Image (cartoon, rainbow, N blue to C red):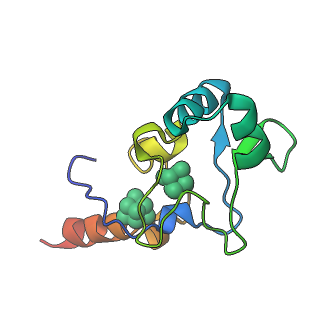
Amino acid sequence: MESFECQGCGACCRIPNGIVRVSESEISRIAAFLGMAESEFIANETDVAPDRKGLVLKSRTDDSCVWLTEDNRCRIHPVKPDKCRTFPYEWINSDSHEICAGLKKLNRLLTID
Ligand code: SF4
Ligand code: SF4
């Protein structure tokens, strides 16, 4: 997907009922970036996943990730989880083409003769 360009809309960071799982190594690198102890990060910045298998980043009541700024920036961008880093290059959901402004733009470009 070489011609994909993120439009910075932040839609992928506020997907209703979306979750971002964090592995042990991701927790380590995010906590280090924030200058926090891993235990502090786990206690204050993660929730148990809905399926009770592992931890997820916290979301706000409007479904946005707590690390998303008002201008759609990620406050932990340099160390964000792999799930965030690899979208939409390595995975998408069935509705991603309706949600992601970059994919919408790419679709428009691909449909122009
Ligand atoms: S960690 Fe950053 S990129 Fe990932 S969902 Fe949260 S704000 Fe978005
Ligand atoms: S939804 Fe797509 S265009 Fe919008 S911030 Fe996420 S990757 Fe970028």
User: Which one is in front, 107 or 13?
Assistant: 13
User: Which one is in front, 108 or 18?
Assistant: 18
Dividing the image into four quarters, tell me where ligand 2 lies: bottom left
Give x and y (percent) for residue 3.
20, 53
Residue 102 drawn above or below residue 39? below
Q: As drawn, is 36 to the left or to the right of 11?
A: right
Q: Quadrant of residue 15?
A: bottom right
Residue 36 drawn above or below residue 92? above
Give x and y (percent) for residue 56.
71, 45
User: Which one is in front, 43 or 55?
Assistant: 43
User: Which one is in front, 50 or 94?
Assistant: 50
Residue at the spot 80% in from the left edge and 46% down from the top edge: 49
Q: As drawn, is 106 to the left or to the right of 41?
A: left
Residue at the spot 27% in from the left edge and 64% down from the top edge: 106
Residue 97 drawn above or below residue 91? below
Residue at the spot 54% in from the left edge and 30% down from the top edge: 32
Give x and y (percent) for residue 113.
12, 71
Give x and y (percent) for residue 58.
70, 54
Marks counted in the figure total 0
Residue at the spot 16% in from the left edge and 73% down from the top edge: 112
